[in-house]
Image (spheres, helix red, strand yellow):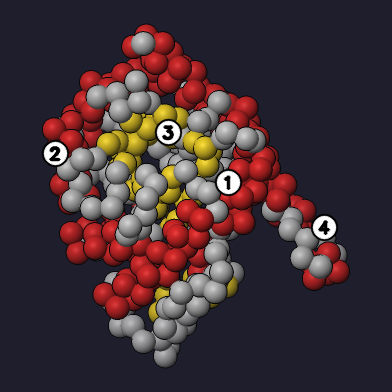
Amino acid sequence: MGILTNTVGSYPTHTIGEDCKAKMSVQDLMAGKDPFVASIKAAVVDQVRAGIELVSDGQVRADMVSTFAAGIPGMKSEKGRSYITGKITRPLKSITAKDLTLARHYAGAGAKIKGIITGPVTIAASSSISRGAPYRSSLDPRLLSDLAKALRFEADQLCRAGADALQIDEPALFNVGVENVLGYIDAAVDDIEIPVKLHPHVASYREYDQLLKLKNVEYIGVEAAKYPVLLDKLTRAAFEGHEKSVALGVIDTDSPKVESVETVKKRIERGIEVFGDDMWVNPDCGLRLQTREVAFQKLKVLVDAATSVKLEFS
């Protein structure tokens, strides 16, 4: 059985780093002390304790757009908002490879680690265009193309750092014409030789007709806990016809209520009925909005349910 447990990304240990940073002296910060190392360690330790098989760094430093805006030339992040200030060019160094390396260290030998990149469409759609920037709008094809090239560099750096898989986050796809932007997502992960997962945050099954056309993505997320109707509309034949597998969301990340193992097990079994047993299973989205205790318990339920299903099908 090909079920593999993983997280989507953000984990609620960011407050550890924020608290550490608030207590640091100017001298500490100037000396390069990193307050978020403790946040990454806590996120990874929780995932490993829960039994997650494909671990992430927890995306603990900032929101998913600001993290990349701060490291891409031609962008800036200011007070939680991101801006396109000039022509987008390749980063001078990796934005997240250091955190991936820390995650591997804390996960231990033999652990599988996933790198996470915010996609070009979401970065563009979530950023304001400053006066003087050479782009007409947030969906200017030149902007999307330049962002895809910058993110392709980041994808390569994560592979060099030892990522076992990549995830590209594109929640803004829900608000744009998917068919017009697929090429930029593909370009951001072109020729990547490790598995690539798309987290699209799409509620409408109609969008999957387009998403399945992506050439450089093997796994496509389906938020089945929040939108179970998707499992009534999507088909195994459609996914297999495009050589795609599903990353099935089986944990509700909006609610603080911790589901029972039986509830999550039924969601996984329903996913198997539709897509077969070659799938990743994960929470619907990131767990950043929950408390750390709730987030951990949800991951533990996910692993226990997946383990139970694997035993029954073995």
Q: Position of residue 250 (x, y in %)?
A: 39, 29
For this rendering, which residue is in front, 166 or 174?
166
From the viewer's perspective, is 183 left or right of 42? Answer: left
Check whether the beta carbons of the residues at disc 2 and disc 1 lie within 8 A of each other: no
Is 186 above or below relative to 256? below
Q: Kindly identify which residue carries mark 4.
A: 23
Q: Position of residue 100 (x, y in %)?
A: 58, 50
Q: Is residue 13 visible?
A: no
Q: Residue furthest bottom?
A: 132
Residue sitting at 42 percent across and 33 percent down? 282
Is 144 above or below relative to 87? above
Residue sitting at 53 percent across and 49 percent down? 162
Look at discs 2 and 1 and give the one toward the viewer. Answer: 2
The tag earlier along the polypeptide, 1 or 4, is 4
The tag earlier along the polypeptide, 3 or 4, is 4
Q: Kindly identify which residue carries mark 3.
A: 282
Q: Kindly identify which residue carries mark 1.
A: 57
The tag earlier along the polypeptide, 4 or 2, is 4
Check whether the beta carbons of the residues at disc 3 and disc 1 lie within 8 A of each other: no
Label 4: which secondary element? helix
Q: Quadrant of the N terminus?
A: top left
Label 3: which secondary element? strand
Q: Kindly identify which residue carries mark 2.
A: 241
Residue sitting at 38 percent across and 15 percent down? 309
The tag earlier along the polypeptide, 3 or 1, is 1
Is 186 above or below relative to 199? below
Label 2: which secondary element? helix
Residue 47 picture quarter: top right
